[in-house]
Amino acid sequence: MEEQEKRMKAVPRLIKTNPRDNVQIVANPEGVAPGTELPEGVVAVEFIPQSHKVAMADFKEGDPILRYGEVIGYAKMDIPKGSWIDEHKVNLPVAPRLEELSAATALPQPEPPLTGRTFQGYRNPDGSVGTKNLLGITTTVQCVEGVLNVAVERIKKELLPLYPHVDGVVPINHNYGCGVAISSPEAVIPIRTIRNLGTHPNFGGELLVVGLGCEKLMPERLFPEIKPENLVVLQQDAGFGTMLQDIVDKAKTCLERLENRRRETVGASELVVGLQCGGSDSLSGVTANPAVGHAADLLVRAGATVIFSEVTEVRDGVHLLIPRAIDQSVGQRIKDEMAWYDAYLERGMVDRDANPTPGNKQGGLANIVEKSLGSIAKSGTSPIVDVLSPGEKVRKKGLTFAATPASDFVCGTCQLASGITLQVFTTGRGTPYGLAMAPVLKVSSRTELANTWQDLIDIDAGRIATGEETIESVGAEIFEKILAVASGTEKTWADRWGIENALCLFNPAPVT
């Protein structure tokens, strides 16, 4: 019996994502040893770790390396079949030329609507629907953060227990508001992001603003219709104690109104779900991301709004996305955002391949091209109906591309500003990332990560790699989990532990 188990463990599990591919991905947790017989009559000539690529053909220097049916790079040297192909053996290809791409040329056939699906949400006066009931406190400038944080601790200790229907207090702290070129054209990005964060659906239409009094980003510039009862200006208060009491008193008034919010049955079409990945590995593009893509398609069929993002992790797959743009104007908007970011990176004297991290490469991703082709799988197959610049509010139902940076924290902040009320986050290497303003549902690409982080990972998509589940079955599981978490009947691990990463604005404008 022991010998049989050893033989079973030694059987190589390789994943080929497209018939054209000349590499395959090792799924075995222990990797494959030299001399292991692989598919297609190939024998491993060296140890190849889990998630990494094995050459299924002999490569001459300059030969294209194909994964997902696309060229992810060119061989830097001769590579015999059965070899481990890592980032050191791959030259980066040229990015797709934007001007050569046409929109609306590969629109998918419409799927039948998914009717009758609901969740328990908080309907707001403006028609939006929240998944949490939170008191949000917006700051206008980083200078007030220290005082506000003390006030928030007092609110949590003294007031929150009196309002059992309020889920928590979220200070919107940031490093903007002064010492910046506030009239620069690109200053519109952080300003609208702060404004839109303050009117997030999970805040129920309540708005408490804390400013200093001498900052460049004055409260009335952010919120022209702000009322005195919803505004605290620290320089108008007589010392620290008065500042605290002013914030606490005005928070109490907001809490009293929030306490009256109740969940009600609403259609799944009221959901706004963000998709993001972090700590990706080579299996992310064959397990977690495609499963999330299937869930995204189900959400779109249910009439919901789905946002995917991360410009640098889309740029090298943009030739597969622009044909899915619903019309020429949406396709042009994608091109415009890609071109803006190309110029932004050029000003910083870096190229797009600065994106992959050491952990990404340890997880088998050779470069940004391979990472991008796996990343866009999160978008599913639905038509792209709209494009948002960073921090813009969502405008349409269906699948939207939000042109955010790929940094987890900047992307998360921008997606919150766009109005997501729940985020699905895929990871292969693992990250404890979480958001205070919206639930974060964590999906792992590998079962080993899910087993190690049993109290951090919500859904294990690694079962796809082992053959226990399919992309469709895990995607359906994610869809059902989204409805349960949005209803408050289930909590993500991040929410159970109170894991809340700081907000991080995207500010390409000058700092003075």
Image (cartoon, grey):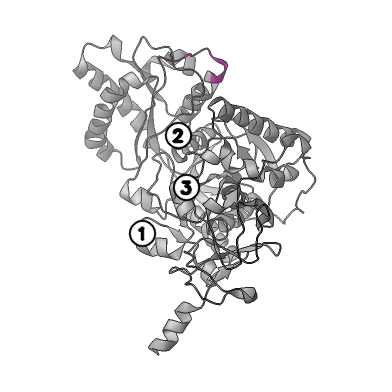
Choose between 457 and 66: the one closer to the eye.
66
Q: How many marks?
A: 3
Q: Residue drawn 47% across and 18% down? A: 222
Disc 1 marks which residue? 453
- The stretch in magenta equals 179-186
Tell me the crowding category of disc 2: few under 14, some 14 to 19, or many 20 or more residues within 10 angstroms, Cα based: many
Mark 2–mark 3 distance (CA, rounded to whole Å)? 29 Å
Question: Where residue 443 is drawn, which disc sits there?
Answer: none
Q: Residue drawn 51% across and 67% down? A: 27
Q: Earlier in the sequence, mark 3 or mark 1?
A: 3
Looking at numbered disc 2 in the image, what kind of residue is underneath it?
Answer: Gly
Q: Position of residue 161 (x, y in %)?
A: 25, 40
Question: Where residue 278 is drawn, which disc sits there?
Answer: 3
State whether residue 121 appears in this view: no
Mark 1–mark 2 distance (CA, rounded to whole Å)? 33 Å
The reply, left or right, for residue 212 in relation to residue 344 is: left
Is 185 contained in the magenta span? Answer: yes
Question: Where residue 204 is drawn, which disc sits there?
Answer: 2
Looking at numbered disc 3 in the image, what kind of residue is underneath it?
Answer: Gly
Q: Position of residue 4 (x, y in %)?
A: 44, 87
Query: Contact, CB < 8 Å: mark 2 with mark 3?
Result: no
